[in-house]
Image (cartoon, rainbow, N blue to C red):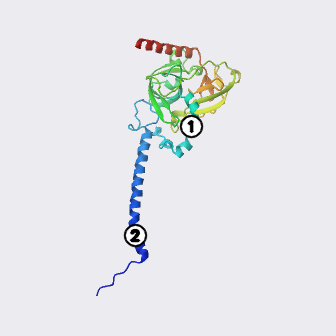
Amino acid sequence: MMRPQRRATPVQVKAAAYGERAWPRIWLWLCSGLVAGALLLLNWRADAGTALCETGRCSTGTHEQPMRYSRLATALPGSPFARASHESELSEQEFSSFSGVGMIVCTVDGVSRSSTAFLVGAFDIAVTVAHTFESRSGKPASCVYNSTDMMGQIRERIPVAYVKSQWDMEPGAAGEPTKDLAVVRLAQPSRFAHRTMPLGRFSGDGRRVVMVGFKELSHSDTFKQKKHGSVYDFLGTHTGVRGAFAHDMDSQHITPGAPVIDERTGIIIGIHTRLGQRSNTMITMNDWLEATIRAELQRETQEAARAN
């Protein structure tokens, strides 16, 4: 005796029909999720390659960088999270004016060091602090100059050809805070910088200033930082070092070598550095720095004349 077949209720029929229609949607969602995940991974790996490079041999997206240089917030450049976490402090006009400010990253005795540097007189001559290149072993530092755009992406990695440091070249200057100066020759001119930076003498009177620089090694942020404040005259420095001047800008995490710029004239009047445990200190251009820059510019002119 055959049992009568059960007829599907209207609810069951609707559920079955919905299930048949839902499967294509589910597969579409799954495929979309896999593609999005793959794109995120590729973007993250590519962005890790844009971090500051110590050797100048890195190539974006093809060479895995040490994890300490990856920047999670810019894994998806332009995303709301990236903009909210790392908003540029410079307007487009200011960025063009300060495009000659870059980052020197070195490996010295197996240790990474960094300083802010700025181009002076030519697109392959930069000024920064001398202590970045100091080596206990006597081995020369391996350094590269980095340029960044408004999104914090590395646009140039130019190897440093050689360094002229006042600490090394002038007898008795080593360790002197006000002689913590270096002129860097790049292996090739910067093509990203729009202009070089005007550097002048400081008269010693107090004035309003702005400082532009990078964070230490740019572990989490490759945006240029801009700080406003004042530089005080010599009698009010309280630095304890003759020839050094105090400023009240927030220099926390800003690397030494950052240019201190007169707000009124736009001319660099000094270089931010640190004296021992002190902070908020500015050293100024001296005779050695001026003569060394002039000599490098003259050498460049002579080399260009011979090439022609």
- Foreground residue, 283 or 169? 283
| In the image: residue 271, left or right of residue 60 | right
Label 2: which secondary element: helix
Picture coordinates of residue 97 (x, y %)? Answer: 57, 28
In front: label 2 or label 1? 2
- Mark drawn on residue 88: 1
What residue is shown with label 2?
Answer: 17
Q: Can you say whether 303 is above or below 88 in the image?
A: above
Picture coordinates of residue 176 (x, y %)? Answer: 58, 20
- Foreground residue, 62 or 176? 62
- Mark drawn on residue 305: none
Q: Is residue 278 visible?
A: no
Q: At 55% across and 29% down in the image, what residue appears?
A: 96
Q: Which amino acid type is marked by label 2? A: Ala
Return the disc, 2 or 1, that comes first in the chain's sequence: 2
| In the image: residue 62, left or right of residue 164 | left
- Foreground residue, 275 or 27? 27
